[in-house]
Amino acid sequence: MESSEAIRPEKMGPLVMKETWNTPGSFVSWERSENIYIVRGERGGIVFVFLNDEMFRMKVFRDKVPDLTTTAAVLAESCVPHLFPVEENDGQLIFTTSAIRLVIEKPSLLLRVENMDGKVIMQQNLTSWNPRGASHAEYDMQPDSHFYGLGEKASFLDKRGERYTNWNTDVFAPHLPEIEALYESIPLLIHVHGTLSYGLFLDNPGRSDFDMRSHGVAFTIGCSTGAYDIYFINGPEMKDVVTRYTSLTGRIALPPKWAIGYHQSRYSYMNQQEVLQLARTFREKNIPCDVIYLDIHYMDEYRVFTFDPVHFPEPGKMIAELRGLGVRIIPIVDPGVKKDPNYEVYKQGVLEKHFCRRLEGDIFFGEVWPGISAFPDFSDVRTAEWWGDLHKYYTDLGIQGIWNDMNEPAVFNESKTMDLDVMHFNNGRPVTHEEYHNLYGMMMSKATYEGLAEHMGSERPFVLTRAGYAGIQRYAAVWTGDNRSFWEHMAMAMPMVLNMGLSGLAFSGPDIGGFAHHTSAQLLVRWTQMGVFFPYCRNHSSIGTLRQEPWSFGEEVEGILREFIGLRYRWMPHLYNLFHEAEMTGLPVIRPLILEYPRDPHVTNLCDQFLLGDNVLIAPVYRPDTDHRSVYLPEGQWISYWDGEVHAGGRHILAAAPLRIMPMYVKAGTFVAEGPLKQYALEDKEETVTFHLYGAKAESGFCAACTLYEDDGHSFSYKKGHYSEISVHADGEEGELRLSWTYTVREYAPRREMLRFALCYPEFSAASVDGLTEISLEQLEKGRTGWARNGKKGALIIQVNDEPHGGELRIEAAKAKKNLIVGDK
């Protein structure tokens, strides 16, 4: 006798189902509710929240009442709704701010954003969803459209013609341009067309897709689950978009100076003796270094919050000796907690219900380095605080930085991550892992950062993460994961890190030298030359590969690496100033040229060179056996850092680049602040700063200015006002240059008695400096005030007492002298 099982549907053959996509339909009504605008259509609606004159949120809803909760990516203080005038006619609903007009076409609910001149900034043509919960919308794409952002993505700078998926994925396989999903998911797209720019941020931590490839005259943004929750961010300049986006999702916390230094890592330094000898070797060879990393082999059978008792028997003693050398330890901490009833962290996690579970209550287990493991549910505040408190184990040992890895989360199974039906209880608003996935790594780093900060008193912590979501910049620096020691991967790092910077991740960088495969002497030199100007600077290599420490390829290579790592430390005042700017404005430390020169058609996809701040151009050599390369110089005059040759901008030049040289250019009429060479960032020595002014002119109309920010470099006291800012100006007049400086804030007093000003490759020779005596360079080095000639080409150095009230000097020109601008007739 058969049962109903005999007529199971699949036995009847495949069931053909037609995919049905719904749209909101035509306009039905609109209403205002507590500063929120709700527009209803026949089958759904869109809720609009204006955050200010330049930004608004639009969220599609299908229920009667829209849900206005946000993810942890968005700062609550940035989401205060504002009221703006509304005009309604037969065919349109129009919202007007001081900067934009949002026009909603009633028949189709098509959306259009215009500027006050009537130019169309953005047009959303179609919003739709299917019965399975997926949503997408289509947007106009112009013939001159260019696309940027999207965080950590492979391929070139401009993402036109590309399609990407946002789904944090452990990708050990070689990173290729065709890989659409890597470790980080930042669903921000910056669209530039003509003289207009805007950003679209999809706040959805599930799987999403950005397709600028498939539709010709349109691009689409879609998600497979969860809400279609889009933020429109107006420009009109790309800088405006970046600044406003980071006001929405947060900006980097100013890192301690030691975190901006050089970091050395390997998978793995296997024991305490190897780590100590490594640090001693850096000091013996006078190669600056601030951090050594401990990969997974430091742990007791890969249990987090432990040290292996055999190979690292005295971690406290080791860390204390390293701190005496000025070196800090950063251990790796993964989310997988080994299933072991005798392991206290696991026991607590089970008994206190801190691990991710299925809806029915069973703990989710997956295999990672420790074997079968459970995973904390960082979506719950209670669990996040528990995890943060566990870091007291490290801070009690003197550790001030943590490396979060495998936090996509990576699992050794077919899907490479948690099962999609695992639950995150999310403080009483449970969601599936399918809906939450991209947030997991960020919430782990948030818990880590907050736990460290709690247990480190007034000291600034440092967290490095592999996985993250929009807003991760508030808690961690990001590295680009398991790259390879390929020249192509070195080249790919530039557009990847530049787009991460445009996506709010100002503190990022790749593994210098490449992680997997075997590096070479040339590759290590060229990658280090580039890497010392990236925001995050770490050399890291995999088990079984050639060693990559700076002395691994002989004395010549060691000498070059010593010089360039030292250059990063001498430029620390300039770098630290840029990190401060990133904290204040959201603008990245290194920048694609399109950010500073948006009207230059040559730079829309230029990504084999970059700007450090707005005035230093770095042009790495990223091919083997290459001693020249083409460099594009934008408008202005550019001075070679190495020999002072002056070049007219707006054209390409052929730059000489023997192995010891990476082409670098400083824009004429700008300052670069340099400090003393240190072996580690917080080495206790005088903080004498030199303001280098490039290409000064003793003629009317010349002017240059900079402001240098300084604080103690390690504590949070700067947030209470304990910092200084010195403003420096240079103004030309006929036959002289007036140099002035003043402290606009001086609540922090740097350890120095002198200030220096250096005219680098000026276009005149100095006859005298008012009120100062000409002295020798030797006298200057011994601390005398005065001015000294520094070689040829009119360079001079001025040394004065560092007075709280500032000062002013007049430099008299001997006679007009013009450097030949290469390319001019």
Image (spheres, helix red, strand yellow):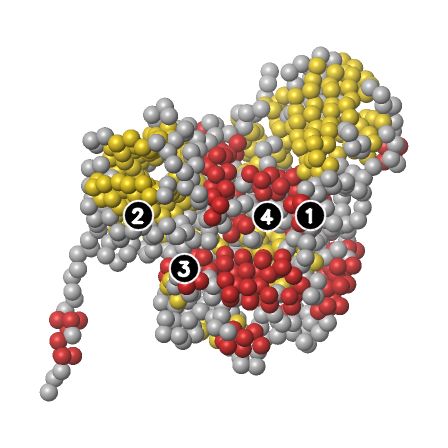
Residue receiving disc 4: 253
- How far apart marks 1 and 2 lie (CA) works out to 44 Å
Q: Residues within 10 Å of mark 2 (few under 14, many from 20)?
A: many
Q: Secondary structure at mark 1?
A: helix
The kind of residue tagged 3 is: Tyr
Q: Earlier in the sequence, mark 2 or mark 3?
A: 2
> Is residue 356 depicted above or below 656 in this figure?
below
* Residue 42 screen position, x and y as percent: 19, 46
* Residue 677 screen position, x and y as percent: 76, 44
Looking at the figure, which quarter contains the C terminus?
Answer: top right
The kind of residue tagged 4 is: Ala
Looking at the figure, which quarter contains the N terminus?
Answer: bottom left
Q: Residues within 10 Å of mark 4 (few under 14, many from 20)?
A: many
Q: Secondary structure at mark 2?
A: strand
Q: Earlier in the sequence, mark 4 or mark 3?
A: 4
Q: Secondary structure at mark 4?
A: loop
Given residues 488 and 319, the one toward you in this image is: 319
The kind of residue tagged 1 is: Ser
Q: Secondary structure at mark 3?
A: helix
Of the two numbered discs 2 and 4 in the rendering, the one whose residue sits closer to the viewer: 2
Answer with left or right where residue 197 lies relative to residue 266.
left
- How far apart marks 2 and 4 lie (CA) works out to 33 Å
Residue receiving disc 2: 60
The kind of residue tagged 2 is: Val
Given residues 218 and 529, the one toward you in this image is: 218
Residue receiving disc 3: 436
Residue receiving disc 1: 717
